[in-house]
Structures are given as structure tokens and as C-alpha cells.
Image (cartoon, helix red, strand yellow):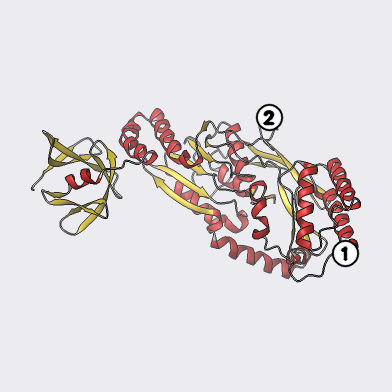
Amino acid sequence: MLHMRKFGSAMIVAAAWLFGVGATGDAPLTAADRQRVVAQLGRTLEANYVFADKAKSIAATLRAHLDKGDYDDAHDKDALARALTRDLLAASNDLHFFVGVDPAFAADYAARKDPARAAALRETERRDEARTNFGFADLRRLEGNIAYVGLSHFADPELGYDAAAAAMRFIENSDAVIYDMRYNNGGHLEMAQLLASQLFRGDKDQELFDYYYNDDGRRVERGQWVLPAIPAKRLTDKPVYVLTSSTSFSAAEWFAYSLHKLGRATLVGERTAGGAHPVDRKPVGTDFFVQVPIGQIHDPVDRGDFEGQGVTPDHGVASADALIVAHRLALADVAKTNPAKQADADWFAPLLAARAQPVRSAPANLKAIAGRYEGRRIDIVDGKPLYTWRERFRLELEPLGNDLFAIEGVDDFRFHIARKAGKIVALERINRDGTTQSYARLD
């Protein structure tokens, strides 16, 4: 199972905190200690780095730094880890690399050969993933029956299958789907395979990813295809959008890139980080570890990748605006294939426009609309207009501009302030089907 780590070039600065590195209280490193670590790191690179010839050159460069005394000032493990990371990045021009200190990881890595210990570690991983809902951070049904899937990372599907199945069933009746990869730093490519399989037919061979990777000297070659059986209905004819940003990394980028290459998704947002190579964490001796690129993935069309370049969206917009833009595109695309849905696109256009550029109503304007209307009233509380009816039900009004207001939690009608000769005379209810009702102002 290929795990494209969810920490990478975008996360290098934070990696020390993520892994709890720190060796305070350790005895100062000796020259022999530093020599041993550099030698162990070189062997680990040669056994795992995706480019075997380059691994030898990088290992030689690190030894040259050692021989020149460039690590003589690294008196503790953290200092040596920082120096090795610096030189790895410079020698390889590969931002995936990171060296850290974590004796517990090295011990756990060795203990994986013990079935009982491996099972205990697996259970710990399951509990940790459960706390993040296996990466499914946000599931929503947006206006116009557009599904939204927000993923913080791709969990191991063996652990997160039930959560994935629930998400896939949640979106199966939507008219379009938006997958949010803006803040997704990667994870297991197999989870991306499972989710992507919902977007293709199951009776036709379709490759999603083709890759190889090294694992402690062993080369593994694999292709990942659309799964023939999935836990939800397929969405083969539904428009798909993937949101991207500069912090989309690794497997998140591949999800976007491959779907785009296959003509199955429109990408909206910013160019991604450019971490195409799968990486893994390998022990270096008993105290250190190295995050190392272990393989290459190729897209199913051109057999290319985006390493160092990133994935370029179809609609380049600020990542913060990507969801609103994608939502608009989805509504428009749904309407193209189903003209009856054009009314939805028109109905929600003012709401999405107000979200893109919030309407600020002046206090005087809000004060003017406050008052009693037939069977209802509007109050201004803490600067917000609140709509009350039957003296007990109350919802906030959202200004949409031009005296138009959306109602909190309500999709099927909105209000318009009716004026005559500049004076407010009624509260007009505009229903989604085009009909209207008017409530005269009473004060």
C-alpha cells in the first residue's frame, strides 16, 4: 500500500513539531557519532531513494561535507538533523527530504516485524485517524444539490473504509460534486483510488495511477485502476470540480491531476505545491529518521507527472475564493445538461455573489427596515436584521443587495423590501417558483 506522506515540502518547517523531535539532555555527539549517522543515512538513501544513481551522488556529497568539517558544530542530534536536511535539499533540489530525530519511531519500525507489536501500532493508528474522521473533515449539500467533500488528508482505506463509504453514499444523489483538496497534504493513494472510482464506470478498465517505489532495496511496480465494486452509486455523468491551492500536496495533487488528465474534473483554485513523488519515513540508525522520496507515479494518459511544477487549475483564482467559483460553475454546468435546472442557477446567483463580496448594509438602512409587518416583524439586534413570525420563530436575514435578503437556513424563498416614493411599504416574499406574497408595513 503506497502512502504518500501528508507532510512534505509545504510542511518541512513544521515537521520538527509534527514528529516531536528533540533530544534535550543527550550527551554531545562525537565525531564518530556524526560519521556513523552520515554513513547510515547514505545507505538508507541508496536503498530507498527513487533515483538510485542520484542517491549515490547525494550520499557522496554528505560524506564530503562531513570530511570538510561542515558538521563539526553539530553537537547534538537536532543540530545534526537540521544540517543534514539542509544539505540533502541543496544536493537533491528535492523538497521532500527531511531528517529528524525520533528514537521511538526507529524502535516502532523494527517492532513491526513482531505481529503483536504491529497489531498494537495499527490500533493506535486507527484511534488517531478516528479523531480526524479519517480525513473527511466536511460533507455538505450546497445550494442547488451540489455535493461538497472536504478532505484534510487521505487515510488508509483499510482503516477509513466505513467513513469513505458513508461519504460516497452521502454524495450519490447530487447533481455535481466538489472535492476540496486546498488544505490536503496527501496520504494514501489507495483512498484516492476508492473515491475516484465512484466517478467512472465499473465495467470498463480505466487506470488511475501507474507507479513504482523502492522499499528497503525492494522495487515494487503497480498500477491502480477503477474499482469494479464500490459501496455507493456511481456518478459517471455528474460534473466534478476539484479545489486546489499552494498547500495541496502529494496524493491530493495526484487526485486532481489524474482526474483532470482523464477529462473527469475541472480544477479551480491555485497552482499546487508540486510534490509528485511518493515519500516514506525510514529509520537512520536508532535515533534518526529520513523522509525520502521512494518512487515515481505516472498519469494514465501521458505517463507524465508534475514534480516541482505543480498542477495548474483550469480556473485560476485565489484559494479562498475557489469554492464559490466552483459552486457557480457547477450550477451553470448542471443547467447546460438539464435546462430545467437553469432556474436554480439564477435563484442562487445573488446568494453566491453576496458570499464572494459580502454586502454591507449601513446602520441607517438597517434601522429603516426594522418594524412591524403583517404577521411578522424585523428587529435589528447587534447590528444584524432578525426576522420573527408568530412571535416565536426567529431567523437572521442576510443582505444580498438591492433590498433583497436571504433567510438563514431557508432556500425556497427570500424577502424584498418594497418601497413606494422612497418609503418602505411592504415586506415582499419572493418564492423560488416565482410567486410572491406581500406583507404590508404596519408602523
Whole-percent x, y for residue 398 in the image: 29, 46
Instruction: Bin the neighbour count of mark 1 within 10 Å (Cα to Cα): few under 14, some 14-19, many 20 and up.
Output: few
> Between 75 and 291, which is closer to the camera in this rendering?
75
The number of discs equals 2
Residue at the spot x=80%, y=43% of the render?
91
* Secondary structure state at the residue bearing disc 1: loop
Residue at image location 38% in from the left, 42% down from the top: 145
Residue sitting at x 36%, y 42%: 143
Left or right of residue 56: residue 424? left
Q: Do we see residue 106 in this rendering?
A: yes
Q: Amino acid at mark 1?
A: Thr
Residue 234 or 321: which is nearer the viewer? 321
Q: Which residue is mark 1?
A: 30
**117 lies left or right of 167:** right
Q: Quadrant of residue 359?
A: top left
Numbered label attached to residue 302: 2
Residue 315: give x, y in percent of width and height: 51, 31
Counting residues from the start of the chain, the first of labels 1 and 2 encountered is 1
Report the side of 294 relative to 370 (left or right): right
* Alpha-carbon span between mark 1 and mark 2: 50 Å
In the rendered image, the vertical position of residue 266 relative to residue 1, given as above or below: above
Residue situated in front as seen by the camera: 397 or 200: 397
Q: Amino acid at mark 2?
A: Asp
Q: Residue 256, position in %: x, y?
A: 58, 39
Of marks 1 and 2, the one in the foreground: 1
